[in-house]
Image (cartoon, coloured by chain):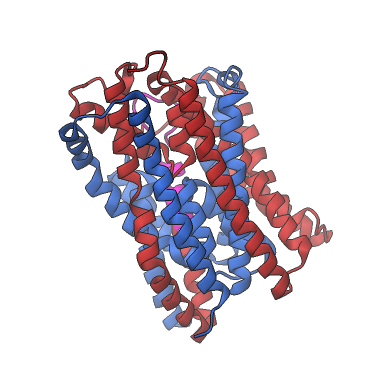
Amino acid sequence: MENTYFDRAHLWGKIWSLAALGMLFCIPVSFGLYYNVWPAAAGVMKGLLAVLPMFWTIAIVEVISYAPMLGVGGMYISFVSGNISNLKLPCAIAAMENAKVRANTEEGEVITTIATASSAIATTVIIAAGVLVFSPIMPYLTNDDSVFAPAFQQVLPALFGALGASYFAKHFKLTLLPLLTGVIVLIFAPTMGAGTLIPITVIVSLISAQIMFKKNLV
Amino acid sequence: MRTGDFKTGTFMYLLGTFVVVFVIAQSLFFIIKAWKQGKRLGIPTADMRNTVTSSILFTVAPAIAIVATVLTLAKSLGIVLPWIRLSVIGNISYEVTAAESALNALGVSAGLSQVVTDKSQFAAIMWVTSIGSCFPLILMPLILKKIQRKIGTVAKSNAKWADIMAAAAFIGLISAFIARAIIGAGKTDTVGDGAGVLSVATLIFSIVTMLILEKLTKKFNLKALEPFTMPLSMILAMCVAMVLAQILPADIAILEWRG
């Protein structure tokens, strides 16, 4: 059987995922060993019961819905470094747009991998620098009473406005229904978070695109 | 049992450093592999270099916003655990929910609004946040290849359809965030996180700037500027939010129509 780049990327990704799993649990285990502190299993279980059904369901939805957009390398990198919908995914989409490559092609795979990995490194370094070096001055940038605070509070509208502009201009017909759906859902459920809203707007967008494609409207 | 500030002691910093090294090592590994593959495919080195530069620029502002959330959680958990948690599978809404849930399960009803001083409570938070967030790492090795193989087969057999569906998926994602900026509610105790004057002004300015910059780069053939149009639009729109907050009357600047 042919061993393609995609096959190799999956193999590397699986190895890194298992290593990441080990690294993730190394943190509470080593803290427990170092300080000889082991929380009551019943307390941990009770805490988990309240969040696991939601977290693990979201994980399934996210893995399935991000897979077509992030490619192989992008998926394995993003799900280790986190902040996917608000950072890695827009970064990958923007990079494909700039490089004029398509998702789900070999070129798209290379570009999304480079984009998500660069973003992951930059995020990790900035957070580490913010914590280790700049923590005394960070509050001046990010505190509620800082002059810079409104800028950081509006990161997402700024980011998705820029990203949306070029997509919406190119695919205007595809845009109307998902955007309208998002607005209508939020009229009735204003506190719904982006994590819950994304699967709804993505599914509506895919269904309406499929119908328009069949009717030769796009 | 060891004493001292267990939340910000050297040991915790060592754990944080370990996480940082791991995430960077994984990313570097994939960049090197993708770069070599890109050369094999004939992707111009300039395109790959531009991807790195524009992705880093694109990341700076959101990453600083993430640092802000680390600092918010630091009041209760010390600075190192939020740093670790937001560096690996991190997401502020997950972390806060999981940590609150762990504390509530242990009978601490005040949750993260109080300072965690008990090692056992701290360890419980570590376990709940780790187990709560680990599922994608188990799931991906099991199902990702099958999903993507299927997508690849379909994409190859009908490229036009695949392109439209990929665009539709992106648009669905972007629509959710734009709808939230237009009409979503924030937390009742936080100013600036709900839809209001600033979010809509930022959104509109970002869209308009992006469209103008795209037109300019095309009209004057400014190829070098192309990769930077998006980060530039984003940063300029954030600056507008900052300026508006200063020049608008306070009751208008903080107006959020859904709370």
Reply above or below: A191 against B192: below
Which residue sits at x=59%, y=28%?
A130
Chain B shade in the render: red
Apparent side of residue A218 relative to residue B206 in the rendered image (left or right): left
Chain assigned blue: A
* Outermost residue, top side: B4
- In which quarter of the view is residue A181 placed? bottom left
* Residue shown at 46% from the left, 34% from the top: B84
**Residue A166 shows in this picture:** no
A99 is higher (above) or lower (below) than A144: below
Q: Quadrant of residue A18?
A: bottom left
- Most distant residue in the right direction: B220
Question: Which residue is depicted at the point 39% across and 77% down?
Answer: A211
- Count of number-bearing discs: 0
> Whole-percent x and y of residue A209?
43, 72
Residue B67: x and y in percent read: 53, 31
